[in-house]
Image (cartoon, helix red, strand yellow):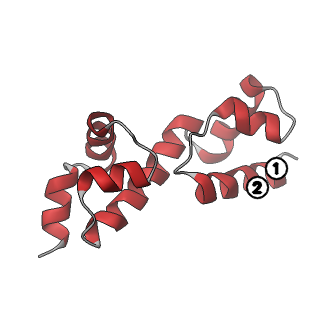
């Protein structure tokens, strides 16, 4: 079974989400071909590696925003150097813009 490896990979993502993570790098760490690893990752989590990573990053960004961190700082802290890309991902997964989320969580 690949489950122990997948659990380790997911744990790694949760600890290193702010870094420049790539499927190929993680696959290599666990001695898998990246195509195969991407497939078993999706089967296990229900998401592609990139989608899973984006969801983890956005959740952490939402926590930071609710603590008063500025939007562009939160984006950089969770691994999005491009704030436009961050805005798009945040809106996709949270249903609202980062600044609106921040305003709503500070009420």
| Residue 93 left/right relative to 71 | right
The image's mark for residue 5 is 1
Which residue occupies 68% across, 54% down?
A: 12
Residue bearing mark 2: 8
Give percent across and percent down for residue 33: 81, 26
For numbered disc 1, what is the local secondary structure? helix
Which residue occupies 19% across, 59% down?
A: 101
Give percent across and percent down for residue 55: 45, 49
Which residue occupies 32% across, 41% down?
A: 86
The image's mark for residue 89 is none
Residue at the far bottom: name it.
107
Question: Within 10 angstroms of label 1, few (less than 14), some, or many (20 or more) residues?
Answer: some
Q: Disc 1, disc 2: CB below 8 Å?
A: yes
The quarter of the picture where residue 82 lies is: top left
Give percent across and percent down for residue 84: 26, 35
For numbered disc 2, what is the local secondary structure? helix
Asked if residue 6 is positioned above or below residue 20 in the image, the reply reads below
Which residue occupies 83% across, 55% down?
A: 4
The quarter of the picture where residue 59 lies is: bottom left
């Amino acid at each position: 079974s690949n489950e122990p490896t997948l659990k380790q990979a997911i744990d790694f993502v949760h600890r290193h989400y702010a870094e420049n993570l790539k499927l190929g790098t993680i696959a290599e760490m666990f001695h898998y071909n990246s195509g195969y690893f991407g497939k078993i990752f999706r089967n296990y989590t229900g998401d592609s590696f990139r989608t899973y990573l984006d969801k983890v990053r956005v959740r952490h960004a939402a926590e930071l925003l609710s603590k008063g961190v500025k939007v562009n700082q939160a984006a950089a802290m969770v691994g999005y150097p491009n704030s436009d890309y961050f805005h798009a991902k945040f809106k996709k997964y949270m249903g609202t813009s980062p600044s609106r989320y921040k305003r709503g969580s500070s009420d």
